[in-house]
Image (spheres, rainbow, N blue to C red):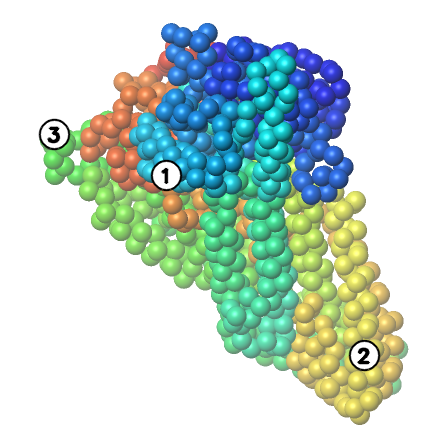
Amino acid sequence: MMISGFPLELMDGDAAHVPVIWISAVLDQLIQKLGDRRVFVLSVLGLQSSGKSTMLNAMFGLQFAVSAGRCTRGAFMQLVKVSDEMKTQMSFDYILVVDTEGLHASERAGRSTRHHDNELATFVVGLANLTLINIFGENLSEMQDILQIVVQAFMRMKKVRLNPSCVFVHQNVTGITAGEKILEGRRRLQETLDEMTKLSAEEEGCDEERFSDVIRFDVQNDVKYFAQLWEGSPPMAPPNPNYCENIQELKKTIRSHALKSHGMSLTHLKDHIRDLWEALLNEQFVFSFTNSLKTAAHRKLETEYSKWSTSIQSAMILIENRLHNEIKNEAVSEIKEIYLHRELNRTSEKVKKSMSEFFEKDTYAEILIQWKTSYETKIKNLQDNIVREAKKKLNEILQQRDHEKKVEERKRLQCTLYEKSKELALQLKDKANDEETIKQEFDLIWEQSMKIITETDILNDVTHVLSCCKQGNKYNNILAVPNYSEYVHFKKSLKYFPEQDVKKSNFMSEDEAQIKAFVEDVVQKTDTMIKSFKISENGYNISCIQQLTVHIKKRVTEHQRKCKKYEFQEEFFVDLVYSICNKAKEHFSHQHRLFMEANDPDLYTTRKRDEYYSIFQKQCHGATQVVIFGEIICQKLKEPIEQSVYKKTARDLAGEMRSNCESLNGNKSNLEKHILKTLAEEEDFDKYMDYINNPRDHFKSFIRDEVSRYITDKFSVSVLPKMKENIKLLQQKIMKAAHESTEHVQVNRGDVGLWLKNFTHQLSDELIFSEKDLSGVKHVDDFKLLDDVIKQELPAIMSDISRRFNTNTFPLKLDHKFRPDEILIDHLCQCCWVQCPFCGATCTNTIENHPGDHSVDFHRVRAITGWHCSQTLCYDICTDLVTGNSSFKRANGDFYFKEYRRAGGVFAKWNITPDSSDMPYWKWFVCRFHKDLEKYHCKGYGLCSIPYDWRKYSKMDALDSLYKL
């Protein structure tokens, strides 16, 4: 494209003539001078000597050069400041007027005039919010070539989701007051535009048939007829007053278009010009420009979507935790989806309003509109999924209430101990000072009470159970093997493999990708199963392993039935079961430990022995039943308070890290950027391969490490203050509940049962604490004293809990689902994890099992996943390959990369578009680790096959490319 200059002239007289490639520098100066103001871009296209510069000068008082020949080379810009009065009606501060060289210039005869004019028209139309098409004279037949160029330019804009508008101006038209002539002129223009649309559609490969299919256009209002500029022959002829009227009418039309536009900021304009320019230079306009603008807009949308989804998920976590407590306290007996939707409605409406404003008012609104419906559906689906999952989890808790026999046994023990100790205390009143006798008697009733408790089954050695899956305890971690070729043997009946002894070389990259995807899916589904076992509530049972084994066996059988090419060896199933169970071993142990601590009578009562002995001593010393009851309440509140504080702090921390931790404050793409940065800094090849082979697990591990590091680093300045604030708020709420319960009983002349019912009801949304926990206490009448006892004893309980707060116990004291790292994992990892069959890049869609194709912003080098040719790894990139004529081999034939979908299977579900964007990160990686890659994939050394210019990238270049994403 031979644009020789792209001058920019300010209204104060400053002028700078600079080439297009340096326009960003000029705009930077302009931004520095004016600020990042918003502008409405008005471009003009027309034939050489069509009077367009004169029209612009007359309309805006500008000083564009005017002559009979070609006076503007390339494009020339001037800023027009919008008056303060007009600013109140418009969304911008300046109109940027762009004049262009005349199309079909005689100076370009024999120099690809049409190609040049087409590029110029495409550039100017793409740049503008409104384009004036200036036609000189009434003979449309002379303008057909120009109109086709203009129509083709608008068609290209439609392809890349830009929606500019246009106005046609017929200059030097005689007798413009003749209404019939104007009507006929408009009709002929409409016909010509429709005809040019059909011709351009054929050239661009589109199916539009009318100009109105391409762009918003009203032939009645967007076509203007201008009288001659002079009345007579210049230079002595006076100006034509009709021309001045025509100018004013055109200004009104421009104003009406401007009122409907948000314009663009100067920063956006700078990027916009660069993208257009590079797209035209690359001669891949649709691909390059689509990717540039679309990627920027989509990234912004993904960032906003992350905020919307976080709002909904955070709201549901609060609802779920509240209902969890109410279920445990038997305040709720049924959970319905309609109720959860209603509870979530306030947050949902806020998200809908935020989405609507974003799609309507954002800078990229015209590009973003294509995703509006799909993202509204995504949010709705997300909300439905969250509600369904919450209902499922809460209903499981409801069911568990019917099976908590051990808890009931513990409660019977409490009642027995309380009643027996009270009776014994009355007998020992005379020996209140004989501590040895009191202790001996207490030990006796303690041992007697222990005999009524059913013993809990001891957890078998989980590691031993899992290692018995394979004789001799020999196994491979199938989640870390470099390939799966050793686990398969090919079916001899394959017609495309005539040899009876099918060799390992027949195991192709798509086979590897297929098995890898299968293993990852099985791991994902079994992870969900493992979480559904609710071991912390029900305890571990060998049936958990049995269920996993049955599920995995079923999945392997189904996969083999569908696969006609190969079969799995027995070792595949065994190693898969072992690897999954071994991976879950820590989870099983931790969850069962929580169950034992909460439900095993021996453990529980051993921890409570000192507590009961203290109460027994006070009974022996003559403490009243009210004082004893108040102390028992405070002691029984200790564990619920601790759990509530931990849960609330975990939620608060998760929210804080979403805001303050750089790696966790965005979406999955932002998290991946930080993972790649960490990997590059550590330069550990094994960790790279773990990330490439098991991206979901690597993400989870990274999140857990980030959370652990954050808790350790910020414990004294953030975590501990949060826990102390939460415990303070709980203390205030408990004291308030006790006081109001006392008032309620006094007003209604109730008994201890009414006091307990009111007290526990007020705390049911915060604490798991039921009136049944104190059902053995009956003789309390001084409720004012009870209120005072709780106020006196509770601070000591709170201080004791606070003293136990430390970095080691905080996360471990929580059930799996309440931990801050799991909250963040649920938010950031509930998305698509399907990997590109060529390079292994992970789909960026934020919904798992989403409709439509998989896609990714940046692909990698194919060598990373082991693609090779003649035992040498392939050092190329998918997005380059799909533009050329090279091919790849698959079992069902050879296929061109540009027709990769025809290969079927996993290939048919991916959308891989050509992209000229440069991503140095993976180029640096393969240069840095090429020997490790070739050793890992058992291929020959091939540094010479790596493009030479890739070797120039340093680690700093790789890291810089991440920050430019």
Label 3 vs label 2: CA separation?
A: 86 Å
Q: Which mark is residue 210?
A: 1
Q: CA distance from mark 1 to mark 3?
A: 60 Å
As helix, strand or loop, the secondary structure at mark 1 comes to: loop
Viewer-nearest of discs 1 and 3: 1
Q: Nearer the viewer, residue 36 or 421?
A: 36
Query: Secondary structure beneath disc 2?
Result: helix
Of residues 823 and 716, the one drawn nearer to the viewer in this rendering? 823
- Kind of residue indicated by mark 1: Arg
Q: Residue 872 versus residue 134: which sits nearer the camera?
A: 134
Seen in the image, is 739 located left or right of residue 598? Answer: right
Image mark count: 3
In the rendered image, the vertical position of residue 534 relative to residue 214, given as above or below: below
Residue at the bottom extreme? Answer: 749
Whole-percent x, y for residue 444 in the image: 70, 78
Q: Could you tell which of marks 2 and 1 lies nearer the N-terminus?
A: 1
Q: Amino acid at mark 3?
A: Glu
Residue 804, quarter of the rendered image: bottom right
Which residue is at the front of the view, 748 or 377? 377
Check residue 499 in the rendering and tell me which mark sits there, or answer none. 3
Tell me residue 520's x, y (percent).
40, 43
Classed neighbour count for the residue bearing mark 1: other residues with Cα under 10 Å, few (<14), some (14–19), many (≥20)? some
Quarter of the image for the C terminus: give it. Answer: top right
